[in-house]
Image (cartoon, helix red, strand yellow):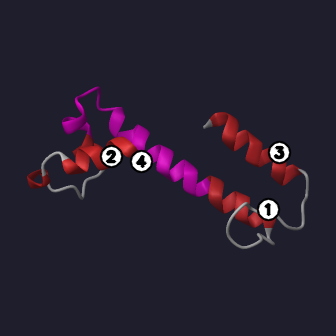
Amino acid sequence: MTAYLRSLDLIRARGFDTLWPTHGRPIRDVAVFIDAYKAHRQERIDQILDPLKAGPGSLGELVPRLDADVDPACGPRPCARCWRR
């Protein structure tokens, strides 16, 4: 993830007017888009790392810490969903 975020910094530093992704619409406000995207990625990283500070655990123990909205009655399915993230 560090290398990926660094690559976004390199793209931003190039000062492109437009990015042409392989799918989706062209991105016109490149710096604004990259800044917002990096902020979102950091939020997701924090959502994962902060609960892990409580210590290690099994997948079943980690899922409720990582995703407080998971109903324990759902069984292993939320664990599989979390594992794919």
Expressed as whole percent of the image width and height from the top left, the position of residue 25 reads 72, 73
Specify the label residue 47 is tagged with: 4
**Along the polypeptide, which appears first: circle 2 or circle 3?**
3
Amino acid tagged 4: Gln
Front position among marks 4 and 2: 2
In this rendering, position of residue 22 left or right of residue 13: left
Q: CA distance from mark 2 to mark 3?
A: 31 Å
Amino acid tagged 1: Ala
Q: Are marks 2 and 3 in contact (CB under 8 Å)?
A: no
The residue that disc 3 covers is 10
The N terminus, quarter of image: top right
Specify the label residue 63 is tagged with: none
Expressed as whole percent of the image width and height from the top left, the position of residue 17 reads 89, 67
Q: CA distance from mark 1 to mark 3?
A: 11 Å
Residue at (68, 43) in percent of width and height: 5
Whether residue 20 appears in magenta in the rendering, the answer is no
| Along the viewing direction, whichever of 22 and 60 lies nearer the viewer | 22
Amino acid tagged 2: Cys
The residue that disc 2 covers is 82
Expressed as whole percent of the image width and height from the top left, the position of residue 54 reads 29, 32
Q: Where, by quadrant of the figure, is residue 73 drawn?
A: bottom left
Helix, strand or loop status at disc 4: helix
Q: Are marks 1 and 3 in contact (CB under 8 Å)?
A: no
Helix, strand or loop status at disc 1: helix
**Along the polypeptide, which appears first: circle 4 or circle 2?**
4
Residue at (91, 58) in percent of width and height: 15
The residue that disc 1 covers is 31
Q: Are marks 2 and 1 in contact (CB under 8 Å)?
A: no
Helix, strand or loop status at disc 2: helix
Whether residue 51 appears in magenta in the rendering, the answer is yes
Q: CA distance from mark 2 to mark 1?
A: 31 Å
Front position among marks 3 and 4: 3
